[in-house]
């Protein structure tokens, strides 16, 4: 007889604890592979970077970045001096160099870019810093991938 009221009293508490407060969702990857590699804040790269998966750079990099049909994100701590070619490019940190985005290039409110952008879609958030030119010709971004192939064969 005493057990029944306790169980009924526990049911609402159990329901309340089963549905915790909404937590911040994990960032969604735009890639079909679902795999993202992160270069940490203490890492420094110098040279050409090629890959077949999404990339998040929080460290420093110099050279050229080619990600073909994948996403490149420059984190808030990232400091990049490179030309970049990727499906989508998002800059939250600092980048000096030309950006070629097959689908789009985004410079967030914390992003700083000094260079030219070629992409069919360009997003500059309020507060973003940008110095350079923008070419939103969808066909212009594709030939930029060919110099990487010819540079490899040379």
Image (spheres, rainbow, N blue to C red):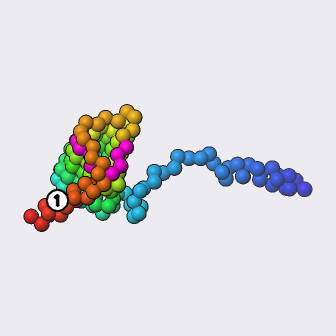
Query: Is there any visible trace of residue 93 in the rendered image?
Result: yes
- Decide if residue 29 is on the left or right side of residue 3: left
Outermost residue, bottom direction?
Answer: 153
Judge whether 143 appears above or below 13 on screen: below
Q: Is residue 108 magenta?
A: no
Left or right: 93 in relation to 27: left
Q: Quadrant of residue 28?
A: bottom left
Based on the displayed image, in which of its 4 quarters is residue 59 positioned? top left
The percent coordinates of residue 147 (x first, y second) are: 16, 59
What secondary structure is marked by label 1? helix
Looking at the image, the residue that sits furthest to the left is 154
Examine the structure image and report whether residue 122 is included in the region drawn in magenta.
yes
Q: Which residue is at the front of the view, 133 or 92?
A: 133
Q: Quadrant of residue 53?
A: bottom left
Extreme top residue here?
Answer: 127
Residue displayed at 56% across by 47% down: 23
Q: Which residue is mark 1?
A: 147
Residue 127 % position (x, y)? 37, 33
Left or right: 127, with 95 as reference point: right
Q: Which residues are magenta?
A: 115-123
Q: How many marks?
A: 1
Instruction: In the displayed orientation, state which residue is furthest to the right.
Output: 1
Q: Residue at x 29, y 37 (%)?
A: 130
Q: Position of residue 30 (x, y in %)?
A: 41, 56
């Amino acid at each position: 007889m005493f057990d029944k009221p306790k169980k009924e009293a526990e049911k609402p508490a159990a329901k309340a604890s089963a549905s915790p407060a909404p937590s911040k969702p994990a960032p969604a990857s735009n890639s079909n592979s679902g795999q993202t590699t992160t270069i940490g804040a203490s890492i420094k790269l110098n040279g050409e970077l090629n890959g077949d998966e999404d990339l998040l750079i929080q460290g420093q990099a110099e050279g050229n970045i080619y990600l073909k049909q994948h996403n490149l994100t420059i984190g808030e701590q990232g400091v990049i001096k490179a030309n970049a070619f990727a499906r989508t490019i998002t800059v939250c940190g600092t980048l000096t160099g030309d950006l070629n985005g097959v689908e789009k290039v985004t410079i967030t409110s914390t992003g700083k870019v000094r260079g030219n952008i070629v992409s069919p879609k360009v997003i500059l958030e309020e507060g973003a810093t940008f110095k350079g030119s923008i070419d939103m010709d969808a066909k212009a971004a594709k030939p930029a991938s060919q110099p990487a192939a010819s540079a490899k064969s040379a």
